[in-house]
Amino acid sequence: MAELDEDLCRTPTFSGTDCCQDRTDRQNFVALGWPFLPKDDLTHMPSLRSPSATPGNYLLSRLSDTDFERLLPHLQACPLNLSQVLHKARSVIDYVYFPLRGTASAVTIMENGAGIEVATVGNEGMVGVMAFFGAKISPNQVIVQLAGDALRMSAHALTEEAGRNRALHDLLIAYHTAFYTQVSQTVACNGLHQIEQRCCRWLLMTHDRVLSDDIPLTHEYLAIMLGVRRASVSEVLRYLQKRGVVENVRGVIRVKDRAGLEAVCCECYKVVKEEFQRLLSNPRSVADA
């Protein structure tokens, strides 16, 4: 897996107040209508499924113009390359990432090298939120599962800004709580539910984070994420295709019937979805609890 190429990261072409003088310009950069979040809270944002939708990061879009401007000097635009390692397991967290497009996977690695995914992060959140709480070491290996791009900033800068900015502080606490819910629910799902249910949960969460019904993913990669044999994944996908829920194309899993996926899935997808809705719709209430 390729390490992050520093030369690929670049400072955004916008700067300071100019990029935020028109709120629409800022929305085009950071806002989106993520399906996990209440639609009435996103009336000013483009629909995720709309052809004209602009990819962005929901956490950043929750900040006011003033709070976002304070982060601008620290943000760098950066590509997310397939299988790129953002954080090594048990290594120092130097940077945090706010995905605009693409998804990352947090994987727990065993001593024998085996691994299993415990969480995914897309444009709804950020990679490295634990750095905000003073955790300098990543407990998981975080790799890019679907290529895209992101904004990154140093973990130190995030901590410093959150210490001065109550809105950012509250938002990070709410997101961390939601992220922890996803991790704990994924652990329970991996241990208690059948492979077809787990596979559907993974496909639904990934479908929420992409701008297409086509998910560029091999059976082998999905097997690694679920911690099962490739043959088991292929069998499940054949079953789902027979039901008309997905279509298997070489290197691509095409979602044809989202409601059908939800029908096969366990309750874990809904639990995580509802918790994200509850926590991120009013982050201040979480911080004050």
Image: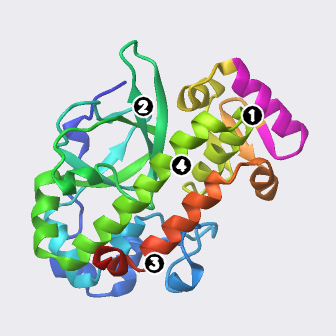
Nearest the camera: 59 or 176? Answer: 176
- Label 1: state its secondary structure: strand
Question: Few, some or many C-alpha atoms within 10 Å of disc 3 (few <14, some 14-19, many ≥20)?
Answer: some
Residue 43 drawn at (x, y percent) = 54, 86
Q: Residue at x 42, y 31 (%)?
A: 83
Q: Residues within 10 Å of mark 1 (few under 14, many from 20)?
A: few
Residues at marks 2 and 1 touching, judged by CB atoms closer than 8 Å: no
The answer to whether residue 112 is above or below residue 213 is: above
Q: Is residue 241 magenta?
A: yes
x and y, in percent, of residue 231 in the image: 72, 18
**According to the image, label 1 marks what residue?**
249
**Which residue corresponds to mark 4?**
185
Q: Return the residue at label 3.
A: 281
Residue 246 magenta-highlighted:
yes
Dot 2: within a 10 Å radius of its alpha carbon, few (fewer than 14), some, or many (20 or more) residues? some
Relative to 200, 133 lies left or right: left
Real-space Cα separation, disc 3 to disc 4, in angstroms = 20 Å
Identify residue for label 2: 83
Magenta residue span: 231-247
Which mark, by number, is residue 71? none
**Looking at the image, is mark 3 or mark 2 earlier in the sequence?**
2
Q: Nearer the viewer, mark 4 or mark 2?
A: 4
Residue 38 lies, in percent from the top left, at 56, 77
Question: Which of labels 3 and 4 is toward the front?
Answer: 4
Say which label, 2 or 1, has the lower sequence index: 2
Q: Residue at x 19, y 78 (%)?
A: 166
